[in-house]
Amino acid sequence: MTEQERTDEINALINEMTLEEKVSLMLHESMAVDRLGIPEYNWWNEGLHGIGRAGHATVFPQTIGLAATFDVSLAEKEYTAISDEARAKYNDAIKAGNRSQYKGLTFWTPNINIFRDPRWGRGQETFGEDPVLTSKMGVAAVKGLQGDDPQNLKTAACAKHFAVHSGPENTRHTANVKPSKKDFWETYMPAFKALVDNNVESVMGAYQRLYDEPCNGSKYLLVDILRNKWGFKGHVVSDCWAVKDFHENHKVTKTPAESAALAINNTCDLNCGCTYHAAIDAVRQGLLSEEKVNESLFRLLMTRFKLGMFDAPEKSKWGNLGIKDIDSPEHRALARKVAQDSIVLLKNDNNLLPLNDEAKKIMIIGPTATNVNALLGNYYGLNSRLVTILEGIIGKVETRPKINIDYHPGVGMYADSKQRGWTLGMCESADVVIACFGLDCMMEGEEGDSVETTKGDRDFIELPEHQLDYLRGIRERGTPVVLVLTAGCPVAFPRDIADAIICAWYPGEEGGNAVADIIFGEAVPSGHLPVTFPASTNDLPAFDDYNMKNRTYRYIEKEPLFPFGFGLSYTSFEFSDLKASVNGDKICVKANVTNKGKIDAQEVVQLYISKENRNADDPISSLKAFDKLLIKAGDTKEVSFDLCKSDFESFDNEGNASVVPGNYIISLGDSSPTELSAKLGASKPASTSISL
């Protein structure tokens, strides 16, 4: 079917409908219009790091862990696997007559908000704090989910939450957010622009107001920017029950009819919730024209046509996918690979890792060692083979008879738990302690997820005090300690709390195996931090301040615990021979990267720029390009990046972009270019300057 034929068919369907039928198709639980051959459909489906809330699925590491891989091609492979499983579930569900929630093809992912504050419980869903990393990983997610044919979608992706959303969760229904226009355009908007440019099918609005307008009814966001400035043709969906916030919480309207009219008039096409029932009254009251309803309905039906929803599933190019393709051996292997590459080695004093058979007695201790919740994060799927950290380590040493393993949780996850002090003696008698501590999905998440903190956010970023006390007790016994930290966010703790520290995030179904692979050297750590780890909660600005001053590596004023982009390896790398040439609008950067060690390993090459004489509100440095390379021991590879002058643009406080004439420093290394990175063991970056 040609695009014109599809357009004609959709318009013909709309012309046959009553107003009530049209409106019924604009809610996430869309009713069937049997007389026109339109089946019921539930638009609400989750695919954040695997098919979520739909039972059996491959559970990949939480998104923040995927971001730590800094591997765009790996991200696309993961989301391709997710879309395979989506089609498989959809095909089987339709054959069974099941059109319920979480069995569809429209996925409300990826979350491309900027992780601006480590207290935000949903930061784990994002690709971190940097606009460029978020843009590139977000585009990879869209490509993997939607496929390579924009007129025949495999599934539909959704860029959310538009815009400037990143907590606090407890005020998201009432907040009026007003960042500077510089921060708005320079930090919060680039990822959304990148996904729109790459044909993302849907955009979801945020709960709060932005510059006084509720995001799901904002003329500035949805009409002026998204539709007119960027030319977005897909559909916009409200966050769930966000439209009723217009009259119940934001108080910008007085009735559900006024709220529905405000949203639809500003091209919010689909209501997750129930307020659009009132669109019928809005039309009758003259608040909303039926033409506007038709425009929104057209965009929604176009998405459904692109997905082939009016054809039998077996007629699509993905019609052969079924239950055999869900959590297949290939997908499990991919989940393990992503988990391995996501793990960040933060410390490795005296090369304690990887462990070998000389560590004859290993004590595994801590509440996350057997905690399935520490594998999952939020918006997760399930399967019958979730490998905990303890199980992964036991599986690794079961064929090593020289090694003895013992285990005890020692202390519980949550603040009301009691220590088992006598277990410290078990640690003292070991050759090495693998201490498994941190957070799980009951301690951070979306509004209502957490059992310990406010609405899913954390009040403090420090490791829970009772866990830290127990770790201090282990440390005092003198046995070498490997800390395995699980979390979806930055966590603050003393750097000397362990000899080796690995950040495992929420590593998914194969998380235990991946952690064991790293600990015993069957995989080499290659993850790098997609977020800054601040040293203390006291170093953070007010949580509800959305300006970027003293936030993220780009504007931070106090030395962090660990810097953005940081991550150690079991080998070392050297960056040399950096050259940058300017040719018109293009800037070509080349350098050599050498693996100086005896182990083949992957390295994340990161390119940053900074102004030589920057203003106080300019970024300290900004990531502009990166690549992940496998470099064999002793080998040298040349890396090359092509930049444009637009990569050097900055915004003023009115939101105007320009390249400010002057000298710019280009740095190439394996961490953000700070003195702390070098102190902690990052490779010395290569740098040069150019004049623009």
Image: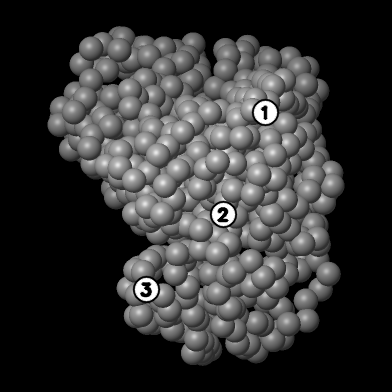
Q: Residues within 10 Å of mark 1 (few under 14, many from 20)?
A: few
Taking the image as shown, residue 481 lies to the left or right of residue 30, namely right
Image location (x, y in percent) of residue 680 = 64, 66
Q: Name the amino acid, label 2.
A: Ala
Q: Residues within 10 Å of mark 2 (few under 14, many from 20)?
A: many
Q: Name the amino acid, label 3.
A: Lys
- Mark 3 and mark 1: span between their CA atoms? 42 Å
- Judging from the image, what secondary structure is the residue with disc 1 in? loop
**Mark with earlier residue (1, 2):** 1
The one of 584 and 224 positioned closer to us in this rendering: 584
Asked if residue 226 is positioned above or below residue 262 in the image, the reply reads below
Tell me the residue that label 1 is attached to: 421
Location of residue 71 by image quarter:
bottom left
Image location (x, y in percent) of residue 85 = 29, 32
Asked if residue 498 is positioned above or below residue 670 in the image, the reply reads above
Residue drawn at x 78%, y 76% as measured from the top left: 614
Residue drawn at x 60%, y 87% as measured from the top left: 688
**Mark with earlier residue (3, 1):** 1
Residue 374 visible, this angle: no
Contact, mark 3 vs mark 1 (Cβ under 8 Å): no
Image quarter (top left, top right, bottom left or bottom right) of the C terminus: bottom right
Tell me the residue that label 3 is attached to: 598
- Judging from the image, what secondary structure is the residue with disc 3 in? loop
Q: Name the amino acid, label 1.
A: Gly
Image quarter (top left, top right, bottom left or bottom right) of the N terminus: top left
Tell me the residue that label 2 is attached to: 500
Image location (x, y in percent) of residue 601 = 38, 66
Location of residue 616 by image quarter:
bottom right
Image location (x, y in percent) of residue 233 = 46, 44
Asked if residue 316 is positioned above or below residue 150 in the image, the reply reads above
**Mark with earlier residue (3, 2):** 2
